[in-house]
Amino acid sequence: MRSVTEQPLRSAISGLPKAPPARRSGRKVLGTGWALAVTTAAALIVVFPLVWVFATSIKPEAEIISSRPGLFSLSVTGANYAAAWSAIDFPRLLLNTVIFAGGVTILSLTFDSLTAYALARLDFPGKNIMFVLILITLMLPFQVNLVPQFLLLSKLHWVNTFQGLILPRATNAFGIFFLRQFFMTIPKELEDAARVDGASDFKIYRSIVLRMSLPALLTLGLFHFMYNWNDLLWPLIVSTNSSMYTLSSGLALFLGQHVIEYGLITAGSVLAIVPMVVAFLLIQRRFVESIATSGLR
Amino acid sequence: MIRSLPRRSGLVARVSYPFATRPRRRRLLIAYAFMLPSMVVMAAFMFYPLIWAFVLSLSNYSFFGTSQFIGFGNYTHLFHDPQFWGDLRNTIYYAAVTTPVSVVLALGLALLLNRRLLPARGVLRAAIFLPAVVSLAVAAIPFRLMFTPSIGLITYWLAQIGVHSTDWLDSTTWAMPAVIIVGIWKSVGFYMVIYLAGLQTIPPEYYEAARIDGASAWQRFRSVTLPLLSNTTMFVTIIALIASFQAFDQIFVMTQGGPAFSTETLVMLIYRQGFQNFQMGYASAIGYVLVLIILIFSLLQMRYFNRRAIRY
Amino acid sequence: MIHHKKRLTGVLLGALALGLATACSSGGGSAPSSSSGSGHVTLTYWNGFTGPDGPTVTRLVNEFNKTHPNITINMSIMPWDVFYQKLLPALAAGNGPDLVAMDSSQLPQYAGKHVFLPLTSYYANPANDTAALVPGAVAATKAGGTEYAVPANFAPMMLYWNKTLFSKAGISGPPANWTQWQSDAVKLSHGGKSPQYGIALAENNTVPMWPVLLWGNGGGVTNSATTEGMLSDPASVSAVSQWATLVLKNGIAPQNLSGADADSLFQAQKAAMEMNGPWATTGYKTAGVNFGLAPIPAGPAKAVTLAAVATMSLNAKDTPAQVSAAETFFTWWNSKNSQVDFAVHTGFVPTRADVTAKELAANPDVAQFESVASTAQPYYLGTQYTNIETNTWEPAIEKILQGAPVASTLDGANSQINGYLGG
């Protein structure tokens, strides 16, 4: 076993004798059954409030807060969905949201991964200070950031524009931190080998690091997309015209000062969540596939 | 036993031989070329506000009229402000519970949902991840109703079988646990997915090797999984810590910091002082104290993980 | 080596291109607030009229734009908390909206910073028909005695009472004075498996309910000139004492209650009474609550109710053309036609005192609310609103409802208030 550590990792692994395939022993099935029970219970508990949201969205308004609380009601209606669709200009808001979330995700993945690579793999003076500085930007509460950011946008005349919406978010410390940690787990031997072959840093970044980080990139992409899809406050701050609003911001209009329009907001929220869930389920599957194909030769 | 594993975590990444031999200026240039796009954006939209906010914290800026430089006046005022200390206590209470609980639950669920044999994994993962996808303003609505027994769903049924519960959100003792629960609910799925990404980078051959060596499930977890996850764990705990210190959304929607300020956190105080009372200079000072506190905790955590990192 | 150079220049060029692209593309639709030469005036209007009122307000503004071809109002509706987070930096940056609507209790703070235009000349001009406005609504537009706004909506509170629960408890009608009110509340409360409360009395995040109780007894949070606190006055102490004892000992209301929960309680028919504004009628009706509306029972000192008022103000930086365009809008908004339309569709009471019940026949609830408009006063705390309300009064009443001693807590709060007002 000791010789393993002296060789490049991957080739050493492939030299191991193949272990006998895991038999589906009784203990394994029991273990799986127990795991299934626990995770299903957890999922049900977690999902319960959202089931309420869905159930409310198909309930007639009269029954939502009534003297006899019940989760589902006998009368199912699509009226809330129709109303939510027309009350806010749904297609327009959807488009804005896709542009906003998509734009931020693409830019962010690019910029964050470039920076993360520098911080993870390139040694340069001031590297650690830079990293801590970047991390500090995460620590300042949004409310304090908000005023100078808004003032800057005003000066640039970027208020109520897409660039004003997207560019301040084009990179963020979370993404940089996340990818840096991930890049540091990629075995150095691959990069060293490539360098010996004369590859430039950018080539290494593009062909090796990025390719091996597909699950991380997909995950981060999903996070960025979802976080910005859901963001309520920032689009409302940047836009002064409701035609620039995103979905979540548009939905906030159903929260009145004195009255909450339960049916409308739950129906609108379901409509807004569905694309995200679909995206997640798709990414989910790509994860496993990408590990299987990219992985361990 | 597998003792020697490649080093994963750490603040300082040791560099590979060829790059280090290049001249220092060249290295700097290349590194900054990579970081340029991010730096441009950050300089404008993150570093500039950071500095601006600090300058603000040294003044009595209140949006209108002239503002004067008052040195550390805001900071001294802060230290004598009982509201600040109370909110600091609340913030630490919130963070001290939310962070470990979310991280441990996330790890546990990730381990369970990483098993190849588990049916419907995708659906279960999606279900647990779902809270992260919903906006808190919407999610707070059913939570309010659940926590208010007089009109709530669960409590109605509970009452039918004779179990009574108090009005969580209107009690100074139970309001904070209520918002903590919502905070954990929202973030567990998110951290779980990060752990899943980390787990999937562990080559299964390591487990095979450990199994051949005769290691039990728990030993495999302690000697293979945990060490190889230390990078991810450091990331998750730091992110969770930062996020929990900045808790705002669900508290704003559910309790507005009440009752009697029992759930008011420092960020809420910043909002209140800044936007309701116009005292933006003072609010910025509070913001900076918060940054300092978070920074100290984060650095401590990084030291901790650094020391426990596996080395060659 | 050539690889490095290429790579470097590539990145630099890319960054440069990005920079150029973003600098060149100018914003589309950034808030315009200028008047073009032809005499056409554009006004940006920010407010927080979300919820069911929004569509009616939008419709009315569109109608104004159509009927006044050389004025265009660009309205932007957003939730109130976003509104305040945007308004302040925008005003500070000098490009705030031309026209703003906000809750009247916030007005004095902004007026005190001189960001809004005093409207004395508007009120002095008889052509603007301001004499027809409800006195309570006009009172809400004043800060330090000067008018800084025009009423946008006016909503007095009434007592909602659940007819079904009343008859079940054997009470024939709504209470007319405090004695009846208090005894009814006790009769209508019971604990047990399915607790019921006499009244949904909220004290946080709500349209003010406790202050109405203070006023009814001759007390108050501050005096009307907001020069000193009134919480230590015997009238205030007695009012709080009476009602807090009823809550704590007789359980007429949950110990602490937010406005939203109070509404839900009444809607779920778990509370028999609630003081609320006209916005709640639609929701309760749809939920099938058999409710009646009654004036808030007269207190020992007087019959009084609270009016929630939203007011419209002008940015102090508006040009004269914008000011005159805005004033046209004000007069149009408060004209009889617009107010009847608004009232009938939203349930708010017209801001004018000269609308008859017959004209409001399409929405009979409005007529009922209008009948109490003369006794309605706004909740006015002057420029120290946030400090008094959020920092002092609300925590004090919350503590009292958790069992703190009434007199000493109120005394402490009162000195704090005097500190804010005196300093």
Image: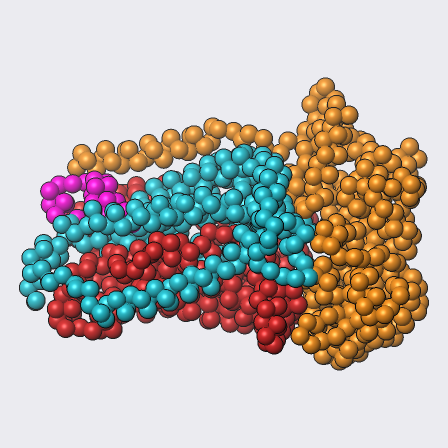
Chain colours: A cyan, B red, C orange
Location of residue C311 in the rendering, given as x and y in whole percent from the top left corner: 78, 45
Asked which quadrant contains residue A64, the reply is: bottom right
Can residue A82 be seen from the camera position used here?
yes
Q: Residue at left 42%, top 38%? A: A103
Question: Up-down: is B174 above or below A127?
Answer: below
Instruction: Give the residues in magenta.
Output: A191-215
Quarter assignment of residue B199: bottom left
Q: Nearer the viewer, residue A200 or A96?
A: A96
Magenta span: predominant SS is helix
Residue B68 appears at what percent x and percent y?
Answer: 63, 54
Q: Residue at x 46, y 71 (%)?
A: B96
Residue A274 placement (x, y as % from top left):
47, 45
Give the residue at x 43% y 48%.
A277
The reply to whether the magenta stretch includes residue A204 is yes
- State the image coordinates of residue C156 (x, y, percent, origin top left): 83, 53
Queried whether the magenta region covers residue C405, the answer comes back as no
* Residue B58 image-quadrant placement: bottom right
Q: Residue at x 13, y 54 (%)?
A: A10
